[in-house]
Amino acid sequence: MVPLLSWLYVHQIELLSNPDRRKTGIRFEADFNNRTMDISIELDLTEKVIVREDEKGKLSARHQQEPQFTPDYTDKFWQLYKGDDLLAEWYTDALKKP
């Protein structure tokens, strides 16, 4: 499951970050006995494709890149000033994932 979740994080981040899609977007079923195990995994994947028709009626499809995760904070250490006065300092988890 870890490699699958890692792939989803890059290519289908909305399955992990969108609460509605998180509820039903990843499903699995396991059937096992004393010697074997079958696992079925279902994913609600999406792919953004732009299709255009040229003047001759020929269709061309262009696959769009998936949006990439951008952290809310890019720095771990923050300082808040009012003029020259330091009001506060704090640390954040700069690479926190959804």
Image (cartoon, grey):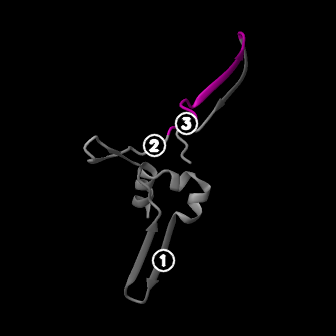
- Circle 3 packing at 10 Å, graded few (<14), some (14-19), many (20+), is some
Q: Earlier in the sequence, mark 3 or mark 1?
A: 1
- Left or right of 3? Residue 70 is right
Name the residue at the top extreme. 84
Q: Earlier in the sequence, mark 2 or mark 3?
A: 2
Residue drawn at 42 percent across, 45 percent down: 66
6 over 43 or under it: above or below: above
| Numbered tag placed on residue 94 in the rendering | 3
Q: In the rendered image, which residue does mark 1 sit on? A: 29
Q: As rendered, which of 49 and 96 lies closer to the eye?
A: 49
56 over 24 or under it: above or below: above
Three-letter code for the amino acid on which mark 3 is drawn: Ala
Q: CA distance from mark 3 to mark 1?
A: 35 Å
Q: For the residue labelled by badge 1, is the local secondary structure a helix, a strand or a loop?
A: strand
Residue drawn at 40 percent across, 54 percent down: 7
Q: In the rendered image, which residue does mark 2 sit on? A: 67
Magenta-colored span: 70-84
Q: As rendered, which of 79 and 56 lies closer to the eye?
A: 56
Query: Mark 3 or 1, which is nearer the eye?
Result: 1
Three-letter code for the amino acid on which mark 1 is drawn: Glu
Residue 82 sits inside the magenta stretch: yes
- Left or right of 8? Residue 80 is right
